[in-house]
Amino acid sequence: GNYYSWGDTATKSQYTEDHCLTYGLIILELQAQGIIDGNSNLTPQYDAATANWGGTWRMPTRDEQEELLNNCTWEWTTQNGVNGHKVTGTNGNSIFLPAAGGRLGTSLYYGGFSGYYWSSTPHDYGAYGAYVLFFSDGREDMRCYFRYYGQTVRPITE
């Protein structure tokens, strides 16, 4: 898949502070510029899933990602030669999340070892971070990463 800075809808050749639209903007500035809505989640025009998939596709919120963490079974596995987690819901349905790593500057880091999936929710403190669903072999949790990092997106739809 592709890598995006938080709030950006296109991939880029460099993932740095200077190449990120939302880096350095506090919550009130993000709202005033229409980047996030009143619930503090990305608006459709700044949501990489909506911009690239269209229709009702969007990035999950922090709460939706936490629901996935708390209510599903996580199994580290390899599918078609790709490491990642098989995530199985209480209804028996499952998805596979590749351990695609992330991008910083022009480099890929931890590809095949870790997954970093943006939520549509900025971090509550400061002007620099957003929530990420993180996982590796034996660990799954929510973290905060700098918005300029290149992370993957797993679209959802209603």
Image: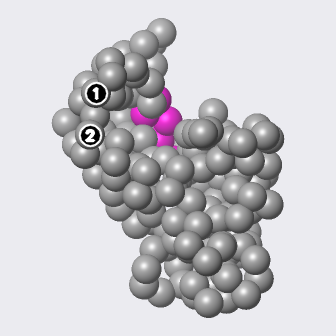
Quarter in which the N terminus is drawn: top right
Q: Which residue is mark 2?
A: 71
Left or right of 68? Residue 137 is left
Percent across and percent down for residue 19 are 73, 69
Is label 2 in a helix, a strand or a loop? helix
In the displayed structure, would residue 111 be above or below residue 7? above
Q: Is the residue marked by circle 1 packed among few (<14), some (14-19), or many (20+) residues within 10 Å?
A: few
Residue drawn at (42%, 13%) of the image: 79
Looking at the picture, which amino acid does disc 2 mark?
Asn
Q: Is residue 62 left or right of residue 39?
A: left
Between residue 138 and residue 44, name the one nearer to us: 44
Q: Is residue 79 or residue 38 the one in the foreground? A: 38
> Is residue 29 placed above or below 57 in the rendered structure?
below
**Dot 2 crowding, Cα within 10 Å, few <14, some 14–19, many 20+:** few
Q: Which residues are magenta?
A: 98-103
The percent coordinates of residue 18 (x first, y second) are 71, 75
